[in-house]
Amino acid sequence: MTDEQRQDARAEGEERPSARSRKRNVTTRGAYRAGSMVATTAIVFSIVLMPFAISSLIAALRHPTGSRAYNLTAPATLTGEWTKLNIAAVAINETTQTVTLRISGFHNCPARCANVERIHFYSVHADPSGAFGAPPSAVVDLPADSSEVEQQITLPMSGDLINYPFDHYRLLLGIAFAKVTASGGEIPFSPAAANNTLAYSIDNFIPRVAFAPPKFLRPAQYDVVGASYDSVSGIDFYRPSYLRILTVLLTLLIVLATAYGVFIRPFTQIIPTVGGLVLGVWGVRSLLVGGYPPDSTGVDLVLEASILLLLLAVTARAMYYMWPKSRATRFKQEVERVTGE
């Protein structure tokens, strides 16, 4: 073989990729293909959900909180001494599972009222058979003359913040109407008498919280020792659809964007930006969750798990980057020791 033929063969060998190089190229193409499929899926998912979010947002703008009230009493003509009240839900505390209600209205007396009347607002036990004693309650005493009524009360409710933005809260609101005697005792009104002298409605003024129409329940099945109700209503609070969709999409896209930054960029460019990636993922929490305590919602758990996985990926890439170099250095040291150079 001539020198020219040897040079041609050497050049051909240099241009032909090795088996290891071909395997790396195949793996890289597969990773890029998987990444593009995930990105495409996220885009399609966002496009499909955005019309529902926009529709929900428009409905919320057209019908803001407090624009719709629901009557909780049967239609009746109020005569003599009567009271009309509105129960407005003005705030909820998801961590303590309580709801604040503003009671406002008007109490009418043809003359000076003979007795003080009292309204009990109960947070009824969902399972009376498994509960001991009367449920939590708040009291509103009506004035002894014709005048306005306004008072705020706080009652416990059931729910679970960990499911945010799919959390759901329920208040079983029981109401009992009674006369207060001179000795301080109470004489309950019969349901028929209460319906002829007391009317009340409920509406919602809590921002970023939707309000389902109340469900009327049979009071007798919730009666317990120490509490008998004239009416019991199931009141449900939940997040509007646009808030649920936007929270899911923003969480998904910020996690994907950070993952692409870790897996696609060269390792030497990742190290200086690891802190920024972590802060970027956790910083979106203030946008999605607001002032809720840390580790109290499902969004917190998703973001924390994402940060953990991203840091593990950076550590794995660091090992993959440094391990071949450490072996090459040891091999070079062994060669130098054997050859004495």
Image: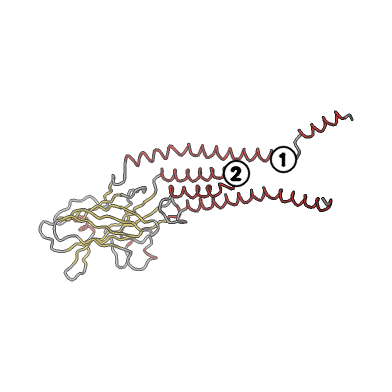
Q: Amino acid at mark 1?
A: Lys
Q: Is residue 302 left or right of residue 293?
A: right
Q: Residue 23, labelled with which disc?
A: 1
Which sits earlier in the primary sequence, circle 1 or circle 2? 1
Q: Nearer the viewer, residue 268 or 88?
A: 268
Q: Is residue 222 above or below residue 26?
A: below
The x, y position of residue 236, in whole percent, is: 36, 52
Q: Nearer the viewer, residue 47 or 278?
A: 278
Q: Is residue 168 left or right of residue 29?
A: left
Name of the residue lying farthest toward the front: 341
Q: Amino acid at mark 2?
A: Gln
Secondary structure at badge 2 equals helix
Secondary structure at badge 1 equals helix
Q: Answer yes or no: do the residues labelled 1 and 2 have beta carbons within 8 Å?
A: no
- Residue drawn 27% across the image and 55% down it: 102
Q: Is residue 24 left or right of residue 282?
A: right
- Residue drawn 36% across the image and 68% down it: 132
Name of the residue lying farthest toward the bottom: 183
Q: Nearer the viewer, residue 54 or 233?
A: 54
Q: Is residue 16 above or below residue 131?
A: above
- Residue drawn 77% across the image and 49% down it: 332
Gap between marks 1 and 2 measured at Cα: 24 Å
Count up the numbered dots. 2
Q: Is residue 228 above or below residue 169?
A: below
* Label 2 crowd bin: few (<14), some (14–19), many (20+), radius 10 Å: few
Q: Residue 2, labelled with which disc?
A: none
The x, y position of residue 258, in whole percent, is: 54, 45
Q: Would you name the residue on which mark 2 appears?
A: 269
Q: Quadrant of the N terminus?
A: top right
- Residue drawn 32% across the image and 64% down it: 136
